[in-house]
Amino acid sequence: MADAPITPKEIPAALNGPSSSLAGLRILVTGLGVTGIPAAVHLGERGADVVVIDGDATADVSEKAQILEVFDVDIRRGPEHVEGLPEGELDVVVTSPGWRPDQPVLAAAAKAGIPIIGEVELAWRIRGTNDAKWLAITGTNGKTTTTTMLESMLLAAGLKAKACGNIGTPLLEAVLEPGLEVLAIELSSFQLHWQESMSADAAAVLNIAPDHLDWHGSPEAYAYDKAKIFHNAKLACVFNCADEVTLHMVEDADVIEGAKAIGFTSGVPRPGELGVVEDLLVDRAFIPQRYSSAAELASLDDVAAATGVAGSRPAPHQIANALAAACLARAIDVPGQAISAGLRSHSLGAHRMVTVAEADGIRWVDDSKATNTHAANASLAAFDSIIWIAGGLPKGADFTSLFADHRDRLKALVLIGSDDSSFREAIAATMPDLEVVRIEPALAVDSGVPKRRGEAVAAAAVAAAAGLAESGDTVLLAPAAASMDQFLNYNTRGELFAEAVNSHLER
């Protein structure tokens, strides 16, 4: 006789609101990271019986443990604790975004009908009477820059705003911070996968290209999770006119009646869009006269100042980022003057197209944040004669189009990463005569100091690039791949690259 089907539990109604008692609820939190800790603290503070599991038993978490012990949180560390559910009945699982749906604990919870939610769903449910507006941003690339641009625009308008979510303050903490009027929220596909209820005031999908296929399983599943950002949008769904997939996401979205579809374009905008006329960013979406005129918001000089290239024309993807941020700001009536002022006061984040040094006619550029092909494509398009430093964890990506599209720009390739097979296949298919210098994977030894891991790789890559570069060339670190095979993270990869460049030039 077949087992009776499991009836899924409902998410406990007691979670809703920031202060109701959770006594009697047993909640599993996965991970002791930036998401897991505030979730466990909040839930424990409200009286839930909280169990936190983490597969890493070696990291020093003593400070975190002291905080959690105040709320009687049960901390279980080690690989044996992430191989299945803990004994005893569970009411809900709150998972960290890095945990894949097929991870044994989550797979077992799903099979048992235990509801699984993430940071976004939890934050939405506990916000209670906090009426701060939610402006949400996702996309394959440009999320962080767009989010910080938006924050700058909101602050310039005199609003109490904060960038949060996948950057800055965890969303769970921001939603409980008193006095905030607007949240500028960066959301990854991982975070969106686990949410169902969020109803953002306005939301944007910047672009879509295959990424994180090892996590989502397919491009379609990845895009499906990204599209969830539009679910229940109240005022505006912002899409990229140059990316048809984002338009289809809006067309398929189940939104609150009255929400508008707003496009952004690097060309002249049509009614219902923001775009560029000559050297101005203009609005033909949020003004009564949109069918006959446009409102000036900012200039390309403002975008250049925002992206650290004052005096030069900003890169096309940075213009797109500024327009997307402006769409979200305009959705809540931020005036044009604040759009311009916000761009001018904006500081571009680290490791995003940063010129580390210029010497002997050679420019050294750190774009370590280019962790996928879509981001690397934008980097490569910005320069003419390139010594490209690339490689790392490919995440299932195909690099063929990068070489095919930029064959006239690429002078040589310095190849890092533990596995270069995907790059080698793409080179063989497109540029078999390209000069390639392979940096030995064995150099990525663990020094015992996490921030120094990969130091020898960075130094060898810079030395190799220096031997290939001539006046007029750009040495570009835009790996098109994740960093964790050889470096602690992309920040460390960029920092060690910059150190190696400066050390080389000081010789």
Image (cartoon, rainbow, N blue to C red):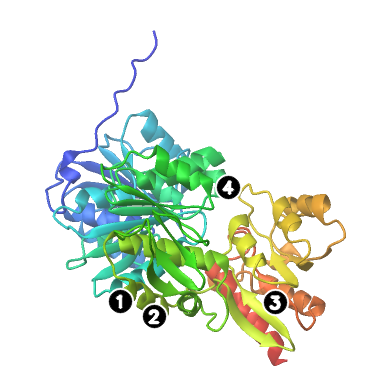
Above or below — where is 442 with respect to 337? Answer: above
At label 3, which amino acid type do we have?
Ala
Categorize mark 1 by other alpha carbons within 10 Å: few (<14), some (14-19), many (20+): many
> In the picture provided, is 194 more to the left or to the right than 11?
right
Q: Earlier in the sequence, mark 3 or mark 1?
A: 1
Where residue 381 appears, x then y in whole percent? 66, 65
Which quarter of the rendering shows the N terminus?
top left
Q: Is residue 229 left or right of residue 457?
A: left
Q: Which residue is mark 4?
A: 210
- Circle 3 — which element? helix
Q: Position of residue 116 (x, y in %)?
A: 33, 40
Say how many tags the image has. 4
The residue to which callout 1 is attached is 156
Asked whether the residues under the numbered discs 2 and 1 touch, taking CB atoms below 8 Å apart as contact, a structural biologist would say: yes
Mark before the other along the chain sequence, 3 or 4 = 4
Q: Amino acid at mark 4?
A: Pro
Q: Residue most toward the bottom?
A: 506
Nearer the viewer's eye, disc 3 or disc 1?
Answer: 1
Between discs 2 and 3, the one toward the N terminus? 2
**Mark number, residue 345:** 2
Q: Nearer the viewer, residue 80 or 203?
A: 203
